[in-house]
Image: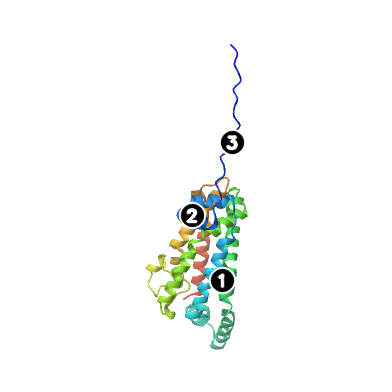
Amino acid sequence: MSMEPVEIPDFVPPPEPAPMNEAVRLANVFFSPGKAFADIARRPRWWVPILLAVIVTTTYLYMFSQRVGWELFMRQQNAQSSQMQQMDAATRARAEVVQLAVAKYITWVAGLAGPLFGALVMALVLKFFADTIMGAGIGYKKTLAAVTYGTLPNLLKTGLAMIVLQLKPPDEFDLRNPVMVNAAAFLPSDAAGWMKTLGSSFDLFTIWCMVLIAIGIAAGAKRMSAGKAFGMMLFPWALYVILSTAYAAVTLT
């Protein structure tokens, strides 16, 4: 009895999902991040969220400069600075003149360049940890896309800060922590500067962004889960918190 050869059909990979348009991609980052970051990993562009961040940040800082003003902000910071309080009157006056000369450019420099510079540095740090240390195989472009889309919740936080800016008296608005959605909200108003800095680091929006970035890294990496990516991010975040708290302990009263 002869056996006829069985034909094995060629493997046909499933069709790639249709690419999302930008509006759908942005919305899905909030409502369906798994699908959004899978699309982002396939097409890792990053300029759209950066453009949105530049527009929102510059608008916010311009509103702050008009309602509160950098002069009042500098005076408040100097009142909390142990270094400024140790200066003699003449030296402090000269320092304040320099501060005010620089302050007029803060809105445009921080608003236009800050979001891009921050994203580039964060992506570089996370790419180092993911690829060099943990062998995730994601690459810089996909990491940068995960960072820029993963930090979109910060735009919502800035929008809330704009509302608080209009509601609070100018001398009571805290630019360093305008939206109290962190542990600093439970501290007394006369708490030490380093305690406020430490408390503000445990922020709901920060955690939200870290979760989204972890999903984005996992979607673009060859060998890393979202949980592992989130755990990886805890080390640079903790290091940043320690350094910023230590700096506040030295410079703030």
- Is residue 91 visible in the rendered image? The answer is yes
Residue at numbered disc 1: 111
How far is mark 1 from mark 2, CA to CA? Answer: 26 Å
Residue 187 appears left or right of 18: left
Quadrant assignment, res 109: bottom right
Q: Position of residue 70 (x, y in %)?
A: 52, 80
Does dot 3 land on a helix, a strand or a loop?
loop
Q: Of the numbered discs in the image, which one, if any, rests on residue 12?
A: 3
Q: Position of residue 26 (x, y in %)?
A: 51, 58
Q: Of the numbered discs in the image, which one, if any, rests on residue 76?
A: none
How far is mark 3 from mark 1, CA to CA? Answer: 49 Å
Q: Label 1 neighbourhood size at 10 Å, few (<14), some (14-19), many (20+)? A: many
Residue occupying image coordinates x 47% and y 78%: 80
Nearer to us in this view, 126 or 112? 112
Nearer to us in this view, 29 or 69? 29
Residue type indicated by callout 1: Gly
Q: How many marks?
A: 3
Residue occupying image coordinates x 56% and y 68%: 54
Residue occupying image coordinates x 59% and y 65%: 116
Q: Quadrant of the N terminus?
A: top right
Residue type indicated by callout 3: Val
Q: Of the numbered discs in the image, which one, if any, rests on residue 28?
A: 2
Q: Position of residue 184 (x, y in %)?
A: 41, 68
Q: Nearer the viewer, mark 1 or mark 2?
A: 2
Q: Label 3 neighbourhood size at 10 Å, few (<14), some (14-19), many (20+)? A: few
Does dot 1 land on a helix, a strand or a loop?
helix
